[in-house]
């Protein structure tokens, strides 16, 4: 049983639902209204979401009816006169909430990809209601007492290791949500959660509005100087879609802004585009998020105190691999100093080029990507525009399928849209099978940007794998925001975007590989600072010769990427790591420091400015996610005090990649088998630290991470990402 959770963010898992399998409802379960969103999924593959029958008007009543159904199911579990057992308590909860989970899948898809004013109206009404619903579950004392009884006897009741782990998960989650609080504290916790839910919705809707409404139109060819043809075509297509045919649009999304900042020769336009993007949620107008952030931080601090933790950060990290904010900070600070030192070197290289060109400037944030590209070309004879023509989106997708086949034995076959309905014409679906030809699940792909779709890239599980009551197959989706070019022409992407594509596909393979019994511990349902490890690891296969030689084909000539160009890509592998690390890590450090501040009154802009200054933030870089637009942290509790997770996971990733390089290379069958068996297939049925140790034979340390980024390796690793 999972309650509805939406985790937004640039590279996030969007957890929307638990199982959608067979109904387990008794005769006295309240009858559901005639709403297609509540009905069991029908059609092939064990049923698929009825996207072709969705009406936004059905979302709110379906959510409300689904909550009523699930509460009735849980009340029956809580009032069962029989002694509590795993089967009548824990397993019964896994069977509850099926109707709501199905509604939640559709609701979250619309919230993240088709978010118009009608959907936003539903969000504003339902956010506090869903928060109250979750509290009704975790504050159900008879239900918690039954869970606790199973928990107390879990090691002596003949349960399997997976059943013991699942019982621990339920008990821990209830306690962390306040199940042991007194009535007054429970009431206040529920009030806080409802207010937070409304604030999260307001925050994300403000950012989305700034992204939707923010656009710069160019109407002269001279304004396009430096831009590759593919970028120009995408801008023209975007402008035409906005009713501005004959112009070029710089949209207020990362997928549009970053290429412009990289290639545009017009410094004034770069600055204008940069300011538009970094000031999302910070305009001082109706969409300004600063007051919302202040209130969110106050409420989180109060809730943490009620739950018995000194700060929100301590509460969030208790149930992670890091365990404490101090351990997470130890890792971040170990990497921060060498990353900043590398930035100073990178800026010096860029300034020399600017001076040689007699630009008469001092490198500013809107110059960094532009001059970094010049340095790349000068140092490594590598121009991103040389690489992009070989990176066709559809070919890269085929390359991902090849990787999945080689490492996991999965095959992908496109599904006819008449058999599997989709929610937008851009979306396609594939069936996934194992080497025996047996169905593993379905994979949906939604690659293009559009109005109402949040920016960034993410993976969503529509249905989680399970088999305790029947063999239920996984359904997942990958979502991106690539800018469409001219109709019929291939979409070309940057190396960074290609890396993100492989990353998010890693999340999908994590879900598709799941081979457990119970859905609440299946697939990607692992601690936040471990979930990014499998996806970050899969990024490495993009640069392998086997992928590049087969799938990096020039969009005009069809010829594979030349070996000498691949060699230059490999030589430049550690290029710009100072920028990439500081851009990310500044966001992670500010996130953690905000949530370690406790109950003090926070002025977000001032706190951000002063904290960065105290850290020695290079003036030439801005946080990857400035506080007023930090959806990871303020559109839900998802990555709050947890944005460090990407670095923690990358520590493990770097070590795991060396397991391949120390063996037979990226395609080593034995290492891949260990990876599937101990990481991708086990979900949260085992402690991640133990699972990784079984894969690698030891805990990871920081040395591999530092080598990966080209930073000096400390004499002794200050952090080991395993258990302590």
Image (spheres, helix red, strand yellow):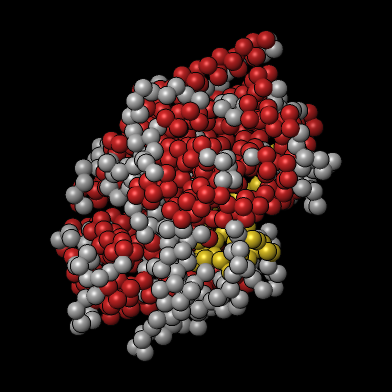
In which quarter of the view is residue 592 placed? Answer: top left
Tell whether 128 sits left or right of 671: left
- Is residue 200 visible to the viewer in this orientation of the structure? no
Q: How far across and down, in percent of the image, does residue 660 sit?
A: 52, 41
Q: Position of residue 381 (x, y in %)?
A: 71, 22
* Image-based side of 316 in relation to 472, left or right: left
- Quadrant of res 276: top right
**Can you tell which quarter of the image residue 198 is in?**
bottom left
Residue at (60% x, 59% y) in the render: 410
Classify 652 as above or below 50: above
Q: Nearer the viewer, residue 716 or 329?
A: 716
Give how far across and how far down residue 676 sits, in percent.
49, 54
Residue shown at the point (34%, 36%) measured from the top left: 720
Query: Up-down: is 599 above or below 466?
Result: above
Is 662 situated left or right of 437 in this image? Answer: left
> The C terminus lies in which quarter of the figure?
top left
State the residue at coordinates (53%, 71%).
57
Residue at x-position 30% and y-position 71%: 90
Choose between 391 and 153: the one closer to the eye. 153
Task: Please state which of residues 207 and 323 is positioned toward the viewer in this rendering.
Answer: 323
Residue closest to the far bottom? 27
Give the vertical position of 225 relative to 598 (above or below).
above
């Amino acid at each position: 049983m999972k309650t509805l959770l939406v985790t937004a963010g640039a590279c996030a898992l969007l957890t929307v639902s638990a199982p959608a399998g067979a109904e387990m409802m008794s005769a006295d379960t309240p009858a559901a209204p005639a709403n297609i969103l509540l009905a069991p999924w029908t059609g092939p593959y064990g049923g698929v979401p009825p996207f072709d029958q969705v009406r936004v008007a059905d979302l709110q009543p379906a959510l409300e009816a689904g909550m009523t159904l699930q509460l009735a199911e849980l009340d029956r579990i809580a009032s069962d006169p029989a002694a509590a057992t795993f089967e009548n308590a824990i397993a019964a909860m896994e069977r509850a909430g099926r109707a709501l989970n199905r509604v939640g899948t559709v609701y979250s898809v619309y919230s993240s990809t088709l978010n118009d004013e009608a959907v936003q109206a539903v969000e504003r009404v339902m956010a506090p209601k869903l928060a109250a619903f979750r509290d009704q579950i975790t504050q159900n004392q008879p239900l918690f007492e039954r869970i606790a009884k199973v928990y107390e006897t879990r090691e002596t009741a003949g349960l399997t290791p997976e059943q013991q782990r699942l019982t621990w998960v339920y008990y821990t989650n209830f306690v962390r949500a306040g199940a042991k609080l007194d009535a007054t504290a429970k009431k206040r916790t529920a009030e806080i959660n409802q207010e937070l839910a409304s604030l999260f919705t307001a925050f994300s809707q403000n950012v989305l509005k700034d992204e939707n409404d923010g656009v710069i139109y160019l109407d002269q060819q001279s304004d396009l100087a430096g831009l590759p043809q593919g970028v120009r075509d995408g801008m023209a297509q975007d402008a035409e879609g906005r009713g501005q045919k004959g112009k070029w649009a710089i949209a207020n999304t990362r997928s549009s802004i970053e290429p412009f900042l990289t290639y545009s020769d017009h410094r004034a336009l770069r600055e204008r585009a940069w300011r538009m993007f970094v000031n999302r949620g910070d305009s001082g107008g109706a969409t300004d998020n600063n007051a919302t952030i202040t209130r969110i931080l106050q409420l989180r601090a109060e809730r943490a105190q009620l739950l018995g933790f000194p700060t929100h950060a301590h509460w969030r990290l208790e149930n992670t691999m890091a365990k404490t904010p101090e351990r997470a900070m130890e890792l971040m600070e170990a990497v921060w100093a060498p990353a900043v030192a590398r930035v100073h070197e990178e800026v010096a290289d860029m300034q020399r080029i600017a001076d040689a060109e007699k630009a008469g400037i001092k490198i500013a944030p809107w110059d960094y990507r532009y001059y970094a590209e010049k340095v790349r070309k000068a140092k490594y004879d590598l121009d991103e525009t040389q690489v992009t023509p070989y990176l066709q989106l559809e070919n890269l997708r085929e390359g991902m399928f090849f990787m999945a086949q080689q490492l996991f034995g999965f095959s992908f076959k496109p599904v006819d849209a008449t058999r599997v309905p989709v929610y937008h014409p851009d979306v396609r679906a594939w069936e996934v099978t194992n080497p025996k030809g047996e169905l593993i699940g379905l994979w949906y792909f939604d690659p293009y940007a559009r109005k109402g779709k949040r920016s960034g890239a993410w993976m969503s599980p529509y249905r989680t794998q399970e088999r305790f009551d029947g063999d239920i197959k996984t359904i997942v989706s990958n979502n991106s925001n690539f800018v469409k070019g001219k109709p019929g022409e291939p979409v070309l992407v940057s190396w960074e975007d290609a890396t993100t594509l492989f990353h998010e596909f890693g999340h999908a393979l994590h879900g598709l590989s799941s081979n457990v019994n119970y859905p609440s511990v299946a697939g990607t349902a692992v601690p936040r600072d471990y979930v990014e490890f499998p996806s970050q690891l899969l990024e490495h296969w993009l640069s392998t010769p086997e992928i590049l030689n087969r799938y990096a084909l020039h969009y005009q000539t069809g010829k594979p990427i030349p070996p000498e160009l691949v060699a230059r890509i490999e030589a430049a592998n550690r290029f710009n790591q100072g920028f990439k690390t500081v851009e990310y890590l500044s966001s992670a450090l500010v996130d953690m420091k905000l949530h370690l501040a406790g109950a003090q009154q926070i002025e977000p802009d001032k706190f951000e400015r002063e904290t960065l200054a105290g850290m020695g933030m290079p003036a030439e870089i801005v946080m990857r996610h400035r506080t007023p637009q930090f959806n990871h942290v303020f559109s839900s509790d998802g990555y709050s005090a947890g944005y460090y997770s990407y670095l923690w996971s990358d520590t493990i990733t770097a070590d795991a990649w060396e397991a391949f390089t120390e063996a037979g290379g990226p395609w080593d069958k034995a290492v891949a088998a260990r990876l599937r068996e101990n990481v991708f297939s086990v979900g949260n049925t085992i402690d991640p630290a133990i699972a990784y140790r079984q894969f690698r034979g030891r805990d990871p340390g920081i040395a591999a991470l530092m080598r990966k980024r080209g930073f000096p390796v400390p004499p002794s690793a200050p952090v080991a990402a395993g258990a302590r």
